[in-house]
Amino acid sequence: MTDALDTLEHDNLGSTVYHLLCNALIQGKLKPGERLKIRELAARLGTSVTPVRDAILRLVQEQALAMKSARDIRVPHMTVERYLEIRAIRIKLEGLAAEMAAQNATADQIALLEDLVRQNEQALADGDTARGCDLNQRFHFALVDIAGMPFLQGILYRIWLQMGPLIADIYGDGGDDMLDFHYPVLDAIRAHDGPAAARAISDDILCGGQVILQHLQAAAAAAEPADATAASGTDHAGVD
Amino acid sequence: MTDALDTLEHDNLGSTVYHLLCNALIQGKLKPGERLKIRELAARLGTSVTPVRDAILRLVQEQALAMKSARDIRVPHMTVERYLEIRAIRIKLEGLAAEMAAQNATADQIALLEDLVRQNEQALADGDTARGCDLNQRFHFALVDIAGMPFLQGILYRIWLQMGPLIADIYGDGGDDMLDFHYPVLDAIRAHDGPAAARAISDDILCGGQVILQHLQAAAAAAEPADATAASGTDHAGVD
DNA sequence: GCAACAAATATGATGCATCATAATTATGAA
DNA sequence: TTCATAATTATGATGCATCATATTTGTTGC
């Protein structure tokens, strides 16, 4: 499932390292601002620098990692502007996925979604936020999978890669209500009502992400308490 | 503008080669099915294999190139299924871009769009399809640029990368009416009417791409007229 | 003690040697 | 002539040596 990014890919060491780092990112094992060193990783993984460099370059390309300078590779910090942009994109793309999933879903696939929600309930009941975070993500990916759009799956995987470090950092704060928005999605899929599914996913992304947005805005405000020029440009990034 | 993919990227030889190949793909200088060899490219460009390998791996990752086997890197063929999927994604994402562009566009930016359309008229009048193709693309990119969404720009650039070889192959067939659908887009942007701009872009993608779709369907029908199992070995179908 | 310069270190970039294996060609027997 | 097998070649993968330079650390003069 997590292999969605490169369909039918030729397996080489670089890809293995890449997926390793992807999982680390998505599971929040790499914190924003953390630095990565090629040689160090290579030593830790027992390979030469070449595959590690391959993997890191791939992640830099898709902006899941950032090269602050020629020799400073770090997990990037999410900004409010970027989060809002990504949110808008997710609403469109995951909406499309939900719509197609509602059209296509078989009984088995619906049962799988229900199972994911059930496991998520259990995880939240147990107070296992890490598992809840993982299951939340798997629900979203399951939708794209059911939609049967492999290219879209790759795009969304890359987007989630960016949100991984962020979500893992914040989820414990107030993510308990994140699951609530999955029920309307499930209802719409059961009814094979595409537009309703898209709306429900949109609600999920907007409401569920509210905590994240507040967190980011608070962090941004704390970072620059005096300077108000950059902070005010939250709604529209004036990137020319 | 074409540098949208990796914002603020550290320049290394691999990136240079990457952009070189990107341009070649988008401008249709690389045909579907064409094979690329690392050593050959390196010799042609006067570098070692390392930067070329970096660039090619990046393009493979985003499926702009495909590794059919461990040592067979080719420009992939577009399939009907994939085209339809990409079309649906484009409608959502370029719709979003058009909507934001309509909200944000300044008079200067609108003038720039008008200029692109005017140049495109001239190109078509001159029968210069290559230039028309290029200008068509630049119009679409200009919209994302005006929308001020750099992350979206990266996603769309990667999508166009996939369509480059295809469009260049087909454009001459009946692309003369492709420009027609840009006028309603321009009108909507002038009126700052986001939803109308999104609808207009959707029309452009659907109608303008009709020729491409027919071409693909004809090619698919010709490729496997009777036998559906063995002949499909050329294109790896079975996207599900 | 502090600042400015210098030496040392760290680190990604690049080139290249070597390896494993797939593709191609050559060889030879039927 | 044809097909099977072996030798050759081609090619991406991997590892590693070296380079350039940013960063850190040490030294020295004030």
Image (tube, coloured by chain):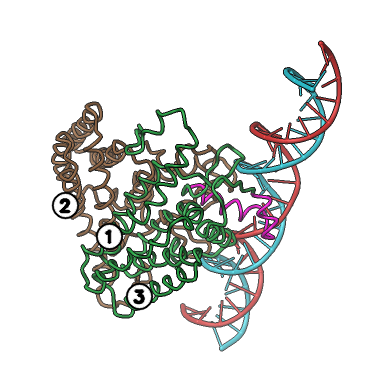
Chain colours: A green, B brown, C cyan, D red
Label count reads 3
Q: Residue at x 22, y 72 (%)?
A: A192
Which of label 1 and label 2 is nearer to you?
A: 1
Q: Which quadrant: the C terminus of chain B?
A: bottom left
What span is colored magenta in the figure? A38-61
Q: How crowded is mark 1: few (under 14 residues within 10 Å), some or many (20 or more)?
A: many
Q: Residue at x 47, y 57 (%)?
A: A171
Which of label 3 and label 1 is nearer to you?
A: 3
What residue is disc 1 on?
Answer: A96
Q: Which amino acid does label 1 sit on?
A: Leu
Q: Which chain carries label 1?
A: A
Q: Position of residue A20 (x, y in %)?
A: 56, 61
Q: Quick check: is A104 in the magenta stretch?
A: no
Location of residue A25 with respect to A111 vertically, above or below:
above
Marks 3 and 2, how far apart at CA: 39 Å
Which quarter of the picture shows residue A24?
bottom right
